[in-house]
Image (cartoon, helix red, strand yellow):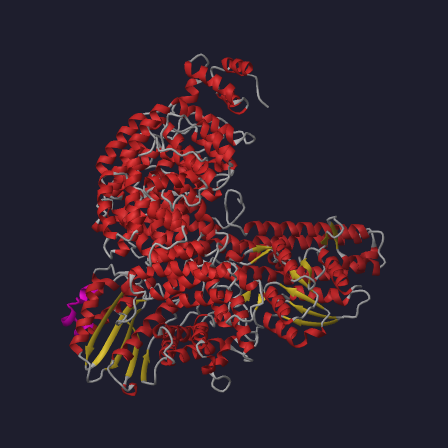
Amino acid sequence: MEYRVKDLQKYLIMSYKNPLEALRIIKYFSTFEDKKNLLGKINKGVLPGKKTLYQFTKCNKLGELAGTKYIPYNELASLEKEFEWVSFKLQYFSDEISLYLELKKQYTQLFFKGDYEKALEVIKSINDLTLSFWAIEQELLCLELLNGFEANNEKLSNLAKETNKPMTLILMQFSSDRVNTLNTFNTFQHKMQNFIESLPDNFTKEILGDFINFYYLENYSELNLDGAKKILSFIDMLSFIDIYEGVIKIISILIAYEQIDLKQLEYILGLIPDNIEDFRLNNIKIIYLNDYTFKNLNKEEYIKTAKIIEAYTSNNYLEVQELSKEFIKNCLLNFSIIDILVKNSIYIRGDIDDYFLSKNEWLKKAMQLMKNIYISKEKEKSINELKNIAKLFHGTGLNLEMLAFSKEQRGDDREYESLWKSGTIYSRILTPLRVKFSKNDLLKENLNSVGFVKTMFLIDSVDILGEDFRSLFYKAKNIKREDPEKAIGILKDLKERYSDLNLDINRYEYERIIRELFFIYLKENNIKEALNLFIECYFIDKDIIIRLHSNKLWNKITKRVAEDLNIFKVTILKFILNPTDTYELYVSLNDITRKFKLKLPSDFLNEETFNIDSLGEDKILLFYILENLYKTDVMKHFVYLMPQKRNEERIFVLRYLIDNSFGNIKSKESEIKEIDKFESVQKRIKQIDQKKIFVDTDAIINEFQEVYLDRFKHYLALDKLNLNITYYDTNIMNTLINLDKEIQYEMKSNPKKKIRFILFKEIVLDYYKELTLNKKFGLEKFLSSRIRHGVLENTLTNTLNRYNLLSLKDESDGNEELLNLNRIQQLEEYGIKQNKDKVLQYFNNFSLNIIAIVERVTNWIKVRTLSQPTGTFDYLAYEKDETLMYLYSEFNEIKNFKVFYSKLTDEFWAHTENLLDKIRQDISTTVFEDINKELSDLENNLRSIIYHDQNVEALIGHISRDIRNAQANFRADLNEVCKWMVVRRSNEFHDFEFNELVETSMEIVNKGSSSFSTTEKIDSHLKVKGEYFNYFIDIMTMLYTNAIKHSGFNNLQNLNIETIISEISIEELPKYTDIIEVDYGISVDKMKEIFSNSNGPIVKILVKNNLGSSVDKSRITEKIKERFMVISQKEVPEEMIIGEGGTGILKIFSILEHNISASYYNFYYVMDNKMHAEIIIDFSNLEVSK
Amino acid sequence: MKFLIIEDDTTKSESVENFLNNLDSVEVKLEKKVSWQSGLIEIIENGQDYNFLILDMSMPRYDPEIADTNEEFETFAGWEILKEMKHLGLNIPTCVFTSYDYFGEGNESVDRETIHSNLTSEFPGMYKGMIYFRTTDLSWKDKLKKVIYGAVGN
């Protein structure tokens, strides 16, 4: 419905004091012409509303930014209506926008050159036009690149002092995060998503979610018309620069992703003021509307770019180098030139630095990554890193092309095409390659005329220009549809010619050749060749097949009878596609095994059952399959293979492959070692009920590892930052944003906090949120699936059911009738009619009360949130600053990522244990009493009937007996539930004594070695907490392995390892250190000091072994000293702890320091021709309380 | 009529057993298995003898005397059994009997309705439906009866 202009005019005049509603009506319920007429009058001041309409569209104070009143959204209105509305603002500020575009060009040029200081000057000029989020982000970016994230944060902090508007603060924070070079794209994305999730479910969430998704997360494929409308209505509140940039981006994405048709596009473009000169608008017109004109473009830039690209096409790489230097000096860089420079550097085997004369290190880094991607060197990693850099370039427009490049190089064709098209709109220069998708023939002619002659010919023609790679490759590409066989022939020749993949040039070309070849094979349905090519290349280098569409190949394979296909290759393809689907891998393995009439895959390796050489070349494929697929998690699907045999089976396969020198021997040896350890340790694991109170912490950390690691690094980096930054509390802001109501953003609190604490808070809140509410691995998920659903009710009512005391619901007829069929039958048997209904009614009432109790308990078994206030699993305390401050002080010194998260996890479980204690108590007292009371009431009620009706006495007696039996037995049900209410971490070990520790460790070590003699003297019978078992196993096995590896005996029968474990007192300490005091300068007083606070047993663990005559004792002592030097710095690099080899001293140090966390002393020395490893530990907190 | 029940929860399997023994006009023979392995082996070796299979979805991979039932508790064991039956060409009418609203963890987490619709499309003919079991609700009996009679044409 559209209103008459006169009525609208009247309404506007009447509501001059608050014209927002009148403006809303004009926006959504008038024709474009009427709107134009009315807004013309508003602009001239003839009608009221100008202040409301444009109040802060142009602003020079931060407090005014995003301050224009929001016109309530009308979801029924068209996209055109939203565009029309913002176009009036663009019209009103069109001169300023033209000026802005001119300044933006200057800024971008300086930015690309790395002249950030001058670029910042230009930003100041842009700010004189109006403030904008675009300029704020660019300012933060320049500061970040100039002086690091400290400068970015400091600027943000200063900006935050100028406004208290949460919206502005939040958006500035997001910009600061986006340009923070320490934040990867994934970390940034994670933060944005968490923010959106934290908003209450209302329109604010919808609109802000859409805006963030589009503007910050760049999820362009998710932008639909509804989202676009909302974003347009949202950006109407911003300044004209942000409105303009938003409008251009939305148009570009909508047309590139085909969300609007050409007619709509033409209409929308017609709304943009004519006097705005923007190459992006021209590009849209050229590509989509067949408009072609150079009048507004820099023809010189075009001609120069064409010259460079033409030189490249003609293989004149040195000329490219020279021309580029000149271009960078005088012209604004564009992505096509960047791309050519990268490829050129591959051909001239030179460094990008040689001719890319910019101080912009991040652009150089991006180019280096592009080079790595082209030559398939750490391709996946480089693509991810490029995405991280692309986010920095968001405001310069380069990011769209970088993202498109990333998608193309990952082989993500669908998303790539649309991104490429939108990137083309943002491309300063339209090159033949960029506009290949355009149907504008005039454009192609014109590209010819600016100088892209050879390139146009190369891309389109089937005639060969020469015998060089590029000519032949494009010929094959261009004839592949008409003459696929010929194209295949050319590509096969090229493949042969460029097969030496040690050369970067060849790697670049080879990858492109096989991609084309693979494409043709698929197109021609030559599945066999496609599969052969894929597997061949997979084994050459996994990086070069990233762009081959294995999914398409798989789909074709599954759609036909594939008897002529190599079953080993098909299996490997399946594995590459989905390495975690153990059942499907089993099916393939089983098919292979059955094809050769064998029972188990390992039978292939058994001479008695199979002649492995009969497989010919496929033998290697089988080896690969056995190594990578035939693992214990796949073996579990073989129904006749007993679980105890799996490890045996795996070790047999691994040993066979080691003996046949297949693949990485070390990795196989270490896998065998792990299996040995697992088997020995497994015996000590408690047999427990299914873990009901469980959180898959490993899976959570794994899922978010990249984000967590980034953030932790950032947190550590801030340790050195000595800034007392005034900051704001994001939490408070989160709760204050509410666009639904009148916007009243008043910061109630602005506490002074160090940024590091803010980050710490973010880490803890984020991690605990995942631990509790993660939909896949969090506590709530397990509470729901393992307790609340079915099993809790079944267990709590088990006894009551057994004694037929519960009336059950019968919903089969659509009614919720309660029936106690057993008692109904009994009443009939006893011939009771008079009080039958009364008896049954008592049972029904009893049942309803019991169900209410069950529901009450069910409601306890929930993580407490705002929407689940009855939950007993209450972690809300961790959202409070007091708790976090306490944790912060506790965790402040931790510098190791794993230790940090492990401590956070410990804290989580300790708190959970307290909560569980309360639940256990409530179940065993309150719930017990309540059920007991219900049972007594039931009995009393039933007995009361006897006073009026003697006929029921026998039956009631019978029922009473059942009730008493139930009363005697139902506690077992409650106990069962209580048993679930204990913390179950991933592995739980029995509490242990030292003899068990030594025995298990020896068993593990012995599995890998031939026999040596051992002596044990264990004088302590201390019981140690099971949670430390694995750590002590690691220490002991390392000590024993050291003894074996470094003893210097060829024949281990000469080796004797002594283990002496005893409890000692502080007074006894000195006598153990005499020998080392001299060598290592260790003071006895210092040792005493370490153990002075001990109020429990101190245990000395000594492992010593004899040494062979060839062992250089002084070298050993030297090595030990070196290690101790590293340890004394307390910051042992993680790779030294994780790394293989060495004596394990650093690993032992790490375990003692971080995992066992008790007072300790350890030293290693040679005495009496024996190596001594001595560890003294305070067991006060490790022993099981007596 | 010969039934195979593969179910690790004794409350459930006893309830089903009692129910089957009281079925009208059906002479019931019954075999019970408590894990994926023992159930699947029974199907492989004697599958052709059974007229109907009552199958739990989540259960231990092995019987308690073979391995720790908690360590290898399989959320989709029933599904795997159905897949193997299909692979082996054994077409025993089957209904899935469960107390859970949804199954699995991680990316595999699915609700009852989704599982039902997936099973229906993956095992047409063999899969006869899903019965939701609760001790405080009787309606499962009626549903199970309908499924059994429907499957055997009674």
| Front position in the image: A712 or A838 | A712
The image quarter in which residue A698 lies:
bottom left
| Placement of A326 over or under A536, stated as above or below | above
| Placement of A1124 over or under A463, stated as above or below | below
Q: State the image coordinates of residue A825 (x, y, percent, origin top left).
A: 80, 59
| Front position in the image: A939 or B88 | B88
| Placement of A1158 over or under A338, stated as above or below | below
Q: Is residue A1077 magenta?
A: yes
Q: Tell me which residue sits at (51%, 56%) in the image.
A: B107
Q: Is residue A99 magenta?
A: no
Q: Is residue A623 visible?
A: yes
Please provide the residue range marked out in magenta.
A1073-1086
Q: Quadrant of the N terminus of chain A?
A: top right
Q: Is residue A900 visible?
A: no
The image quarter in which residue A137 lies:
top left
Q: State the image coordinates of residue A827 (x, y, percent, origin top left).
A: 81, 58
Q: Main secondary structure of the magenta part?
A: helix
The furthest residue to the left: A1078
| Front position in the image: A873 or A510 | A510
